[in-house]
Image: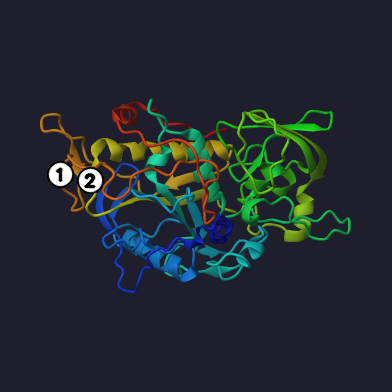
Amino acid sequence: MAARGLASWLLGSGLLGVVLVSTTASAAPIELVEQRGQYLLFDDVDGSVEGADWFSRDGFLAGYAQVEAGLLAVHPDDSQFIVVYTTWTLPAGIGAFFQSVANDVQGIGFAHIAAEDPVIPAEFFDDTPDSQVQGMLHMNRWTQYLGSDDGGVDEGVISLIFGQELGHAWGSFVYFDQGMGAGWETTMLGRADAHWSFYLDSGGSPMQGHPWADNGDGTFTASKPEVFLYSDLDLYLMGLLPADEVAPWFLLEDPSSCVDAASGDGVCAPPDAFRFEADTYTIDATRRDITIDDVLAVEGLRVPAWPDAPDEFDVSFVLVKRPDEVLSYDELAALDVIIERTIELFELQTRGLGRVVNRTVGTPPLPPDDTGGDETVDGSGGTADATGDAEGSGDGGSTAAGDDDGGGCGCRAEGSGPGQRLPWLLALLALRPRRSRVA
């Protein structure tokens, strides 16, 4: 989400007391270590990326400059988005974040978020005039996308965090007006005015809200999706669906008698909440139907709109590590699988209407033979004996994925920890089929 979302969340959490090391004019760009199958591996040579103050304008631009400069020194300027994974964790409570660095799209509510975001200077702007980049996704420590100790990737976490962070390039910021004298209304919005309200029927969107079922008796029940899918409204804001194909949706007002089946305490969640404890959440509420015309009454039509808006998004994926860290072949291959599945899931999330084009696909190094022990990549691009901490020094745990995602919105996460043994991923790399586009 927008960085303003994160700053607001941090302020409410008392976490703005965390002091981050500011990058300086002498900061150095990240340096390429090697090409992987799905991404480029870089060293944060002087710690200016790890230590960046991402949630102020000057701090973000200084940290981002080291990422962009290092990438463009070895890779063409061919991406609208840079996705950054790291081997360290963002400050406690932050699962990931998105920050726009340029916007020229009208009709998506960007004027509202620009007024609050500490990094965005105006509704229309370009902080990257020397490149085509429009935004950066900081995905936090890469291990949060692994599944349980049984192996695999966590598709729920991936679809939530990547789906939300990339979705923050266009939402969720819009207001609506139903012409009933109330004027512009913001009640579709929840946390930091950059996510959907807990009580919005979003169909299980990564932008939050829930898939609310109308029980026909004045009660409504939300359930937890296994994979988060964009709503019609999300797809319209992304430029992937025409306005006349956006089905009506609803907002639940005056919630009461809220029952989180795991607790049953009757206390209703605030609109800026997201997760609930049990598998379902049932409430009494008044249903308010909303249409795309109610949004257009405030925002006007999206420009460019479908079918003139892009439906393919060029993305560069990078993993940034500390220079003294060593990563095993299995670990490096694990992120290849995570990224490939992320791209496949995005196509599913958009119903095949949108596609991520990975511009950092390459030929990875061959796996080490089994005669000399497990080899690991060191900061000079060579190999080293894997006798130390595979995660490097100084970072003991992984930020879990989940409760919110991130995106300038500093999403919090709950959930899965890193897997330590990854040979199953090597098998997946060799055996996984290519998915066709979703019809």
Mark 2–mark 1 distance (CA, rounded to whole Å): 7 Å
Image disc number at residue 144 = none
Identify which residue, 182 or 344, lies in the foreground.
182
Q: Earlier in the sequence, mark 2 or mark 1?
A: 2
Contact between marks 2 and 1 (CB within 8 A): the answer is: yes
- Say left or right for 188 vs 366: right
- x, y percentage for residue 210? 66, 38
**Residue 254 in sight:** yes
Kind of element beneath mark 2: loop
- x, y percentage for residue 395? 32, 48
Kind of element beneath mark 1: strand
- x, y percentage for residue 311? 55, 48
- x, y percentage for residue 153? 42, 33
Q: Residue at x 38, y 60 (%)?
A: 77
Query: Which residue is label 2 attached to?
Result: 326
**Residue 300 in sight:** no
- The image quarter in which residue 215 lies: top right
Identify which residue, 71 or 191, lies in the foreground.
191
Give the amino acid type for the residue marked by disc 1 in the picture: Ala
Q: Residue furthest right?
A: 180
Q: Residue furthest bottom?
A: 25
Please identify the quadrant where the N terminus is shown: bottom right
Q: How is the image coloured?
A: rainbow
Image disc number at residue 384 = 1
- Say left or right for 437 vs 421: right
- The image quarter in which residue 384 lies: top left
Instruction: Report crowding for label 2: few under 14, some 14 to 19, many 20 or more residues within 10 A (C-alpha).
Output: many
Residue 382 against residue 265 in the figure, above or below: below
Give the amino acid type for the residue marked by disc 2 in the picture: Val
